[in-house]
Image (cartoon, rainbow, N blue to C red):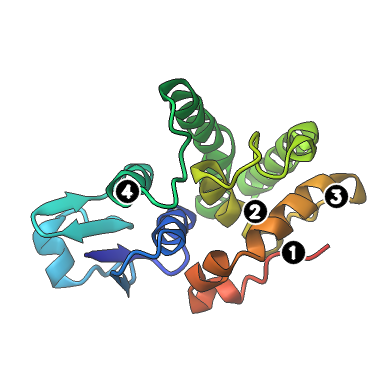
Amino acid sequence: MTLFSSPTCAMSHSARLVMIEKSVTADIEFYDPNDPPEDLLELNPTGVSPTLIERDLVLYDARIIMEYLDERYPHPPLHQMDPVSRANARMLIKRIDQDWYALLDEILNSGEKKSARAKKMLKESLLSAIPVFAARPYFMSDEFSLIDCALAPLLWRLPSLGIDLPSQADPIKAYAERLFEREAFQASLSNAEREMAGFRK
């Protein structure tokens, strides 16, 4: 199994985190998405990051890769076992992608004016969710899950984006620290991501 990954893409980071949480034996190949290696392009002509290769299987959507790894390697489980809880978790990740990752993409790929607007919107949206972050040890759960694997890379990047959370956001910071302190999270960081130096309380 090989995971081709951008060293800076938050979605790729999520997939790496799941892989390491699961202690999956695999190669992680870092590459520049603007200059994909030939062996990747032969299997996935789009060269998109992340791309998971396992024998004849080629997956190139971070959330599908995360789900696949959780099903392929069931221990430790990162999804609830009952169908209703799993469906709710999938809906939460979809909301995180639509509400927060869409703004992250705008920050990274827009001009200065639109980027500043997206930063303000992301900060305000996160602050509006403080009660959710404060309610339980993990995001809407007592157990670490795929939802946290989706959120951790986004939160880690906030300082490098110039988004500073105020003191009222201590529940978000405390939640983030619980994720950042996990051994798997630290092991999932590329050198470029380590330099982002996720915020500290």
**CA separation, marks 4 and 2?**
20 Å
SS class, disc 1: loop
Image point 38% across, 43% down: which residue? Answer: 63
Q: Closer to the N terminus: mark 4 or mark 1?
A: 4
> Which amino acid does the dot numbered 2 rest on?
Leu
Position in image of residue 189 (x %, y %): 51, 70
Which residue is label 2 attached to? 155
The answer to whether any part of residue 110 appears in the image is no
The three-letter amino acid code for the residue at tag 4 is Ile
Q: Amino acid at mark 3?
A: Asp
Report helix, strand or loop for mark 3.
Answer: helix
Q: Are marks 2 and 1 in contact (CB under 8 Å)?
A: yes
> Tag 1: residue type?
Phe
The answer for how far apart the CA atoms under marks 4 and 3 are is 32 Å
User: Foreground: 22 or 177?
Assistant: 22
Callout 4: SS: helix
Could one spot residue 120 in this view of the protein?
Answer: yes
| Of pointers 4 and 2, the one earlier in the residue sequence | 4
Q: Which mark is residue 65?
A: 4
Q: Is residue 127 left or right of residue 78?
A: right
Mark identifier at residue 170: 3
